Image (spheres, rainbow, N blue to C red):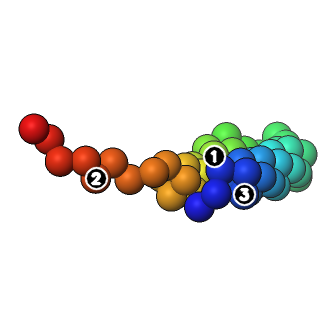
Amino acid sequence: MQPRKSIALLIGISLVFAALIVACDRLTEGTAFNNNITYLLVAAWLVPFCFILAKSRPANNAPES
């Protein structure tokens, strides 16, 4: 994946998840599971973030000598 494309994708996904976290925090304010929803969204954000980050790194296929 090209570096510019992956950076734009990472920023876009991060902004979407930030908006989701803020919206869910406002909607579930004062409830018992407010923190659980926030933690779940952060965990869900890590999956595509790490996947895109791994795809954007070049493979190191150099043989060891």
Q: Quadrant of residue 39?
A: top right
Q: Position of residue 14 (x, y in %)?
A: 75, 48
Q: Is residue 48 left or right of residue 12?
A: left
Locate residue 10, reporting x and y percent. 70, 50
Gap between marks 3 and 2, in whole Å? 23 Å
Q: Amino acid at mark 3?
A: Lys
* Element carrying mark 2: loop
Tell me which label, 3 or 2, sits earlier in the chain: 3
Q: Which residue is mark 2?
A: 61
Q: Position of residue 55 (x, y in %)?
A: 51, 58
Mark 1 residue element: helix
Q: Residue at x 25, y 47 (%)?
A: 62
Residue at 73% across, 51% down: 4
Q: Secondary structure at mark 3?
A: helix
Q: How many marks?
A: 3
Residue type at mark 1? Val
Q: Residues within 10 Å of mark 3 (few under 14, many from 20)?
A: few
- Say whether marks 2 and 1 touch (CB < 8 Å): no
Q: Amino acid at mark 2?
A: Asn
Mark 2 or mark 1, earlier in chain: 1
* Residue 44 drawn above or below residue 26: below
Q: Residue 37 in the image: x percent, y percent?
A: 67, 51
Residue where numbered disc 3 is placed: 5
Looking at the rendering, in which quadrant would you find the N terminus? Answer: bottom right
* Frontmost residue, 20 versus 65: 65
Q: Which residue is mark 1?
A: 42
Q: Residue furthest front?
A: 65
Q: Quadrant of the C terminus?
A: top left
- Residue occupying image coordinates x 77% and y 52%: 8
Q: Marks 2 and 1, Cα distance to the nearest angstrom?
A: 32 Å
